Image (spheres, rainbow, N blue to C red):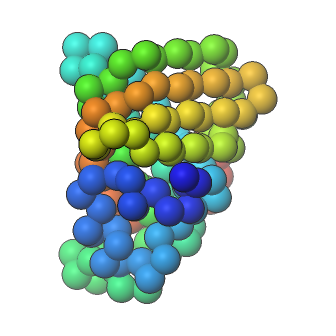
Amino acid sequence: MSASDWTAVIGATDEVTHAYTTPPDLNACRLYYTQIDERDASVTLMFETTALPERPPLTWAEREYNTVEIYVKFTGVRGLRVDGWQFSARDAGITLKPREGTNVRVTVEAEGSYLAFTASGSTVARFRSYLSSGTDC
């Protein structure tokens, strides 16, 4: 399954699917944040996009924004493999492959960067907008 139909694989995507007619393709988003938590056996990936929703949440109505962040948290992570991690990972290709039940196989690949694991659960942990200055750190 490609990253363009990720909401069919990830749990708790209602807020995203309500806001977007077609949710942004994760491969078109920038991977801005990766957290591996060995205590919680979880991996959180934060994607950033300038593709703004057609029906933004009501809580966004009073603020100006030009960027959206989508945090996807994977739980019950096993078989974690990391092979290098370069700045190029920000533009990585993401592959989500559904497995039996709620399991999903996640692969993040870019030149010099590779992250792969299987998770027993996944959810959109955070969905927010903000006004970006447009400069990268």
Question: Which image quadrant: the C terminus?
Answer: top right
Left or right of 91 on screen, residue 69: left
Q: Position of residue 114 (x, y in %)?
A: 63, 24
Q: Can the viewer see residue 57?
A: yes
Q: Position of residue 117 (x, y in %)?
A: 46, 25
Q: Residue furthest front?
A: 100
Residue at 33% x, 24% y is 77
Left or right of 32 on screen, residue 43: left
Q: Residue furthest right?
A: 111
Q: How many marks?
A: 0
Residue at 63% x, 14% y is 83
Give 30 or 98, whichever is nearer the viewer.
98
Q: Position of residue 120 (x, y in %)?
A: 28, 33
52 over 127 or under it: above or below = below
Q: Can the viewer see residue 35?
A: no
64 over 120 or under it: above or below = below
Residue at 46% x, 57% y is 6
Q: Tell me the quarter of the picture where residue 41 sits.
A: top left
Q: Position of residue 84 (x, y in %)?
A: 66, 15
Residue at 49% x, 77% y is 22
Q: Tell me the quarter of the picture where residue 59 sits.
A: bottom left
117 over 71 or under it: above or below = above
44 over 14 or under it: above or below = above
